[in-house]
Amino acid sequence: GENVEQHPSTLSVQEGDSAVIKCTYSDSASNYFPWYKQELGKRPQLIIDIRSNVGEKKDQRIAVTLNKTAKHFSLHITETQPEDSAVYFCASNQAGTALIFGKGTTLSVSS
Amino acid sequence: GAGVSQSPRYKVAKRGQDVALRCDPISGHVSLFWYQQALGQGPEFLTYFQNEAQLDKSGLPSDRFFAERPEGSVSTLKIQRTQQEDSAVYLCASSFRGGSNTGELFFGEGSRLTVL
């Protein structure tokens, strides 16, 4: 089955800096790669996703890149703000299967 | 309702007790998923329904765990003879799509189970 590795587990940045979180996956058949944000005590919420037919997707300050050959994908947050502080999870799956999540990255943005 | 609803939000059980956790997905959502989230960890997949059919239960950790969705809407996750290692937040998520394209998952607030 699919296995998703995520790193780093914790990331501290200064407000305005960029943050990058990386994930690798094991199943070459995986074709959907979302990122979820979970604030303390809250439910995970989708922030951006990418499918295997594109290499990059951007939505304002966040972007995701995908390298299918290397089986890794990354989340990029630019101009970080204190409200970006949360736990971020990557996930992947293929058609008809459940999403498998990474273990999460705790992002702390200090002002 | 407007979102995925789970109950109870908090449950304290003595070791050996049975518990039942309920999930009300968003109306019309085809797919329903249960995940277990231990403190400081990512959601771990338990089981997945498409309508009333349980398509994958490979993540259920033991035969003490049982899930059902008899009418393709509300789902119940039952844990028999609870153990301390069952303590976790149990997240339910639903998705409008089924089949080959699951799409965005909408999560509930979770049910926090503490086994003493």
Image (spheres, coloured by chain):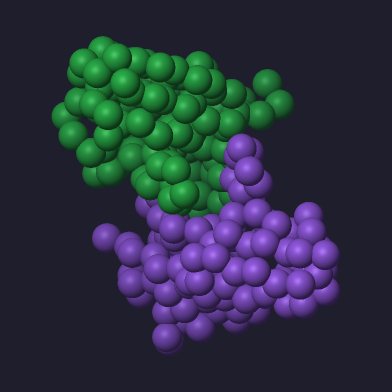
Chain colours: A purple, B green
Query: Left of B16 or right of it: where is A66?
Result: right
Residue A109 location (% of width, % of height): 73, 64
Q: Position of residue A71 (x, y in %)?
A: 42, 79
Using residue B69 as the reference point, say whether residue B9 is left or right of it: right
Q: Is residue B67 visible?
A: yes
Q: Quadrant of residue A70?
A: bottom left
Quadrant in the rendering for residue A42? top right
Q: Residue at x 33, y 23 (%)?
A: B115
Q: Residue at x 39, y 25 (%)?
A: B114
From this view, report whether residue B21 is shown above or below residue B93. above
Provide residue B7's location: percent of width, then percent of height: 52, 18
User: In the image, A15: left or right of B90?
Assistant: right
User: Height in image: A46 above or below A59?
Assistant: above
* Extreme-left residue of the structure: B63
In what quadrant of the picture does the N terminus of chain B appear?
top right
Nearer to us in this view, B56 or A108: A108
Comparing B76 with B100, the one in front is B76
In this view of the protein, which residue sits in the foreground, A66 or A24?
Answer: A24
User: Is residue A43 rendered to the left or right of residue A57?
Assistant: left
Is residue B60 depicted above or below A27 in this figure?
A: above
Can residue A63 be seen here? The reply is no
- Specify the quadrant of the image occupied by residue A1: bottom left
Residue at (65% x, 46% y) in the render? A39
Quadrant into which the C terminus of chain B falls: top left
Q: Position of residue A88 (x, y in %)?
A: 59, 58
Q: Count the numbered circles shown.
A: 0
In this view, the residue farthest toward the bottom is A69
Q: Residue at x 76, y 64 (%)?
A: A110
Name above or below for residue B3 compared with residue B8: below
